[in-house]
Image (cartoon, coloured by chain):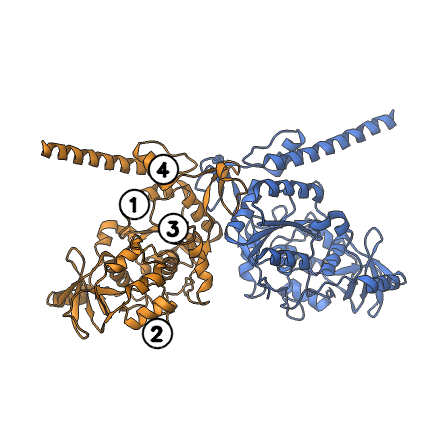
Chain colours: A orange, B blue
Amino acid sequence: MSRLVKPHGGGELKPLLLEGAALKAELDRAKGLKQVKMSSRETGDLIMMGIGGFTPLDGFMTRADWEGVCDGYKMASGLFWPIPVTLSTDDDGIKAGDDIAVVSDTGEIMGTMKVTEKYEIDKAHECMQVYKTTDLEHPGVKMVMAQGKYNLAGPVKVLSDGGFKAKYGAQFMTPAETRAAFEKMGWSRVAAFQTRNPMHRSHEYLAKIAIETMDGVLVHSLLGALKPGDIPAEVRSEAIGVLIENYFAPNTVIQAGYPLDMRYAGPREALLHALFRQNYGCSHLIVGRDHAGVGDYYGPFDAQKIFDEIPKGSLETVNMNIDWTFWCKKCGGMASQRTCPHTKDDRILLSGTKVRAMLSEGQDLPVEFSRPEVAAVLKKYYASLAEHEKVKVELKGHSAA
Amino acid sequence: MSRLVKPHGGGELKPLLLEGAALKAELDRAKGLKQVKMSSRETGDLIMMGIGGFTPLDGFMTRADWEGVCDGYKMASGLFWPIPVTLSTDDDGIKAGDDIAVVSDTGEIMGTMKVTEKYEIDKAHECMQVYKTTDLEHPGVKMVMAQGKYNLAGPVKVLSDGGFKAKYGAQFMTPAETRAAFEKMGWSRVAAFQTRNPMHRSHEYLAKIAIETMDGVLVHSLLGALKPGDIPAEVRSEAIGVLIENYFAPNTVIQAGYPLDMRYAGPREALLHALFRQNYGCSHLIVGRDHAGVGDYYGPFDAQKIFDEIPKGSLETVNMNIDWTFWCKKCGGMASQRTCPHTKDDRILLSGTKVRAMLSEGQDLPVEFSRPEVAAVLKKYYASLAEHEKVKVELKGHSAA
C-alpha cells in the first residue's frame, strides 16, 4: 500500500485526458462542435485537469462552486478549493445543454465540454476575495477582468496535453508519474519546491533543509505563462539541472514541471499549490517569503499564515514554512532571518533587477549568491538575448536604410 | 490551553520532590530510617523523578515493570518505557514493607521509599535486551553488572535536587519551567537537541535546521556523570553560551540541563531521551548519527530506526532524524551526507581525539569546524588542565626531592 498522501478528496487520481480510440473518436466529434476559445490560464487549467493535477474536479466550476470557493474556500460539494477554476466566453448564443469544443489561443482543439450552466459573475467580487484587490496592475486581477461576460460550467473531456510532453519530455511528469517515481525511490515524506525562477543558493538552501529532514524534494517548475521579463522554462530547467547535478546527492531530488499559468494570488495560490502537490504525491509544500505574490499586495508571510486559517483537514499536504534566506558573512554560511542574528549589512542580498543587470553585462555573480554553473547558464541566456536584440536593431537599421 | 505535547502518559507532570513543611517533616523522618546508598546513575534517576522528568513514574520499578520494559518496552501498566529505572542493594536485611532512606554516594539523604517488593534480576538479560551486549567494556553494562544483588521497588518521596539548582542556577530547568518558557515564547513545535559535548558547527547546523522549520530549540545538556575525559558541564555550558550569543537569533533557542547520567544505551537511550523530552514539552528530539552510543556496539543510525519499530502512539514526541553533518569545501557550506554529493576528501572532518590534541597544544581549530568563540573557551579549559597537570608534576618532583 502506498505511503504517499492521498489525492485531494481522498479518492483515486482523476485524469480527464482521453487516450487511444476514445481520444480519436472524441476529436472527430469535437470538429463538428461550436468552439469556445480559452485564455492561456484556462488552457493551463484544462491541461491540469487532463493529467489529474486538479483531481477530483471533472470540469469547470458552476456558479455555486464559484461562490463557495470565493467566499468560503469550498465547492458546492463541500470539497476544499481555494481559487475558482472557471471558463468564460462572450458568446451570447451558447446555452446550457450545448456540447462545445474548447480551443487554445492557437486554435488547437483541447477538449470538449457539456455545458450544464451559463452564468454571470461579479468579477470585482472574485478579485477582492481571491486577490484582495481590484487593481488592474495586478496580473491576476487583469486576467479575471479580461474574462468573457459569461462563465460556462460543465464536465470536460481533455484531448491534448498542450504539447508539454513533446516540448519538455520526461520533465513534464503527470501526478501518476511523480507518484510512481516517489514509490520507486521509497519516499513518503516529499516536499514540493515550487519555482518560477532559476534556483540560486537561497533556493538550494530551502530545498536542502527539506532534504535534511525528509525523504526527498520535488523541484516543481511552472511551465505555463509568466510575467514578461521572467526567465523561460527551458533556461530555468537547464540551470536547475546543472545545480542538481553538481550540488545535490543522488536520489534526493526530482525535477519536474507543471502546465499552469501563474495567477500571482499569493496566499490563495499557495493553497492551490499545496492542493495540486497533494495530487502529485507530495506531503509538504515549501512556503517561503512572498510565495506566489507580486508587488506589495500581500504581506511577506501571508501565504504561510493562511494555512493556519483554513479548516483543519482541508488538505493532507501541509506547509513547510521557511523564512527569507541568504548568505551571511558573519555566519559564514547560508541562513535565514530565523537562524541569523546579524544585520542586513552582513548579508549578500541582490535584487532580481541587480542580478539581471549583472548577468546581462556578462558579470559573474558572487559564489555565495549563485553557483558558478548556474550563473553560466543564465549568462549564456542573457548573452543570446542581447545578440537577438542586436540582430533586431541591425535588421531595423537595415530596413530603415 | 497549552499547545505543547502532553507529559508522558497523557496526564499532568508528576514531580515527586517535596517542598516546604512537607519536605522538612519527611527529612526529619528520613533521619531515623535505614539507609540505602544509591549509585550515581540511581541518584540521577531519583532527581529526575523529583523534578517530574520521569513522569508518570512514582518510584523505582517492580519486577514486572523491569521484565516488561526489558522484553517489550512497557511497564506492567502497559505504559511505554524503554529502559529500566531501578534501585539496587546488597543489603540482605531489607524486606518488603520497610521504609528506607536513599542516600547519595556522598551520604546526602536524597529521598525516602516504601519498599513494596524486593527481587533479583538476571543482569545479563537486562544488558542483552537494553545494551545488546554483556561486554564489560561497555560503560552501561559495567554499571548494571556493578549493581547490588537485589532490586528494591516502591514509591519514592524526593527530598533534594542534588544541588543542581545551586550549581547551575537558571540553567537547571525543571520540565514545568521549560514548559512555562516555551509557552511564554509562544512555541509549540520545539526540538530538543541532546548534548553531552560542546557544540561545534556540525551541532549548530543540526539545531539550525530545526529552527528553520520549527518554533525553537532546547539545547539540553546532560549535567550528570560522563565517561572520563569528557568535557565538564560548566565548560560545555560556557562554550554553548558563547555560541548562542554570537550565532543564534534571539528567541529561537534555550539552553538548559538535566540531571541524568549517560547510560550509553544507544537506540534504547534515544527513546528515553524522547520520552523525558516530552515531559519537558518538546515535540521533537533531534537524532543524529550514533545517538547516545559508545564504541561500535550500535549501527550509526540504529537510534533513528528504533523509532519506527516501537508501537505507534508510544510517544507524542517524535524523532527528527539528521544524517552526519560537516563543512564541505565543494558545497561551500555546512551539509550532511544527505545533502552533499561530494567525497570525504572535500569535507572538514576532525576526530574527537584530534580536536582534543589541537586544543591541548593551543592550536586554533578551523573556522569551518568550530566557531572561534567556542574554540577559545575550550582552549582555556585545556590550558587550565595542563596547568593543573604541571602543578601536580612539580609538587610530585618537590616531594620526591
On screen, residue A396 versus residue A322, left or right, reads: left
Marks 4 and 2, Cα distance to the nearest angstrom?
Answer: 48 Å
Q: Are marks 4 and 2 in contact (CB under 8 Å)?
A: no
Q: Give the chain letter at badge 4.
A: A
Protein chain holding label 1: A
Q: Which residue is mark 1?
A: A230
Image quadrant assignment for residue B283: bottom right
Q: Residues within 10 Å of mark 1 (few under 14, many from 20)?
A: few
Q: Is residue B277 above or below residue B201?
A: below
The answer, for residue B224, to whether it is visible in the render is no
- Do discs 1 and 4 share a chain? yes
- Residue A397 rendering spot, x and y as whole percentages: 13, 32
Amino acid type of the residue that numbered disc 1 sits on in the rendered structure: Asp
Residue A77's label in the rendered image is 2
Q: Which comes sooner in the sequence, label 4 or label 3?
A: 3
Q: In the image, B134: left or right of B301?
A: right
* Identity, as a three-letter code, of the amino acid under mark 3: Asp
